[in-house]
Image (tube, grey):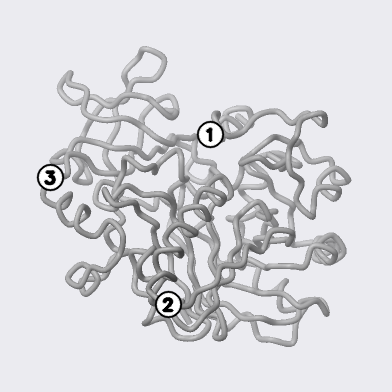
């Protein structure tokens, strides 16, 4: 079973780690080796796919008395300053930014002119600046895109500055016990922070940025830590009996149960927010006003959309990326992510299906190793989320 879970990693972006390869290291690299993590290459970094195993790590995050700690330092962290930064951010992102109050953040999208998604990202109003986190595999391409758009913006006499926070640690503490554990390390009451809010606070005496968010569907936090303090602080956190170190394998199965996309697997530049079922990131006012890259094309795609991203419950073998979906013998879609859910103990998947067949409850078939298995279009998340709303 564990071998099956390990396969949930996107094969094009994760491979066995070789110490001789030119791969980047996060500030926690030495600790991963000390903890005997099984290392792979992911998004150009050496990261642990697992420590004790994907299944126990997954269940530690879902458990009532435990939580998991992940190294997500490969993600791209960006600091935006300049008096016109909000105006600029509303050009390159599809969501409202001006309405974010200090500490508030939201998930949004970066799109190209034809509406295709370049990346999904989280933007937060940090008061004196805006803090953005982009996907590790996309960060350099994202920043090149930003630079091109900044040049146009600055040519209009506007002021915005982008600072890439490269050599810095970022961990995710996820699960029911995450608030209790993190509270032991700070005088700030992190237990009362609503979901998708962030603050600059001291954690274990170290200046950190803490955001209540994550990629698992559970309550939890992402903690930005100076590189030199990353290993000492994480070692202290791991001394708490409730905390289990977790790798990429569990992160992938957790996010799939939560119905969350992996860029490059479930989303790419051929998919717009319409097909990706992500139009909720664009408010009605933004749809009406426009002003962001891809607006016109996205509005047009609302009329011409041919497929939708949905969830599937499958009877039989787990379906992997690329598995074909059939209805009455006709190929009508494709699976993008799939696994044997550790929480539900049954196969779940995400993929794209022909519009009109995307309604929950629709019966289809999914082909796995030349055999077709019954499946049902299912609403996501597959496992209820536990975000703290305050």
Where residue 348 sits, quadrant-wise, is top left
Q: CA distance from mark 3 to mark 1?
A: 30 Å
- In the picture of the structure, the residue carrying the numbered disc 2 is 158
Residue at position x 21%, y 40% in the image: 307
Indicate the quadrant containing the N terminus: top left, top right, bottom left or bottom right.
top right
Mark 2 crowd level (few <14, some 14–19, many ≥20, 10 Å Cα): some
Residue at position x 21%, y 75% in the image: 285
Which of marks 1 and 2 precedes in the sequence? Answer: 1
- In the picture of the structure, the residue carrying the numbered disc 1 is 10
Mark 1 crowd level (few <14, some 14–19, many ≥20, 10 Å Cα): some
Quick one: SS at disc 3? helix
- In the picture of the structure, the residue carrying the numbered disc 3 is 304
Q: Nearer the viewer, mark 2 or mark 3?
A: 2
Q: Is residue 334 above or below residue 100?
A: above
Q: Is residue 287 above or below residue 20?
A: below
Q: Nearer the viewer, residue 216 or 119?
A: 119
Residue at position x 38%, y 76% in the image: 87
Which residue occupies the extreme top position in the image?
Answer: 370
Which of marks 3 and 2 precedes in the sequence? Answer: 2
Which of marks 1 and 3 precedes in the sequence? Answer: 1
Q: Position of residue 120 (x, y in %)?
A: 44, 55
């Amino acid at each position: 079973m564990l071998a099956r879970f390990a396969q949930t990693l996107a094969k094009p972006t994760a491979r066995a780690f070789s110490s001789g390869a030119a791969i980047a290291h996060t500030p926690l690299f030495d600790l991963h080796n000390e903890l005997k993590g099984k290392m792979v290459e992911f998004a150009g970094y050496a990261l642990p796919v697992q420590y004790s195993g994907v299944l126990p790590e997954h269940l530690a995050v879902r458990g009532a008395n435990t939580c998991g700690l992940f190294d997500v330092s490969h993600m791209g962290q960006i600091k935006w300053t300049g008096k016109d930064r909000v105006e600029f951010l509303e050009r390159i992102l599809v969501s409202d930014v001006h309405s974010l109050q200090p500490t508030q953040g939201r998930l949004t999208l970066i799109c190209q002119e034809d509406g295709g998604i370049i990346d999904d990202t989280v933007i937060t109003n940090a008061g004196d600046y805006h803090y953005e986190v982009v996907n590790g595999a996309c960060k350099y391409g994202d920043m090149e895109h930003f630079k091109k758009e900044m040049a146009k913006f600055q040519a209009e006499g506007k002021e915005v500055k982008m600072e890439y926070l490269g050599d810095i640690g970022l961990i995710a503490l996820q699960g029911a016990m995450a608030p209790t554990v993190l509270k032991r390390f700070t005088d700030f009451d992190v237990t009362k922070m609503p979901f998708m809010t962030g603050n600059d606070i001291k954690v274990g005496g170290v200046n950190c940025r803490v955001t209540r968010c994550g990629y698992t569907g559970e309550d939890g936090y992402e903690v930005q830590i100076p590189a030199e303090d990353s290993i000492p602080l994480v070692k202290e956190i791991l001394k708490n009996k409730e905390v289990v170190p977790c790798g990429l394998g569990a992160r992938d199965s957790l996010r799939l149960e939560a119905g969350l996309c992996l860029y490059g697997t479930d989303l790419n530049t051929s998919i717009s927010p319409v097909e990706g079922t992500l139009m909720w990131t664009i408010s009605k006012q933004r749809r009406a006003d426009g002003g962001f890259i891809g607006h016109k094309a996205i509005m047009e795609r609302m009329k011409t959309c041919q497929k939708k991203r949905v969830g599937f419950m499958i009877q039989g073998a787990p379906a992997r990326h690329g598995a074909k979906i059939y209805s009455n013998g006709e190929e009508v879609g494709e699976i993008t992510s799939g696994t044997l859910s550790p929480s539900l103990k049954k196969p779940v998947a995400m993929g794209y299906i022909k519009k009109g067949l995307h309604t929950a409850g629709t019966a289809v078939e999914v082909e796995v190793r030349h055999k077709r298995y019954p499946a049902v279009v299912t609403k996501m998340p597959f496992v209820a989320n536990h975000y703290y709303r305050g």
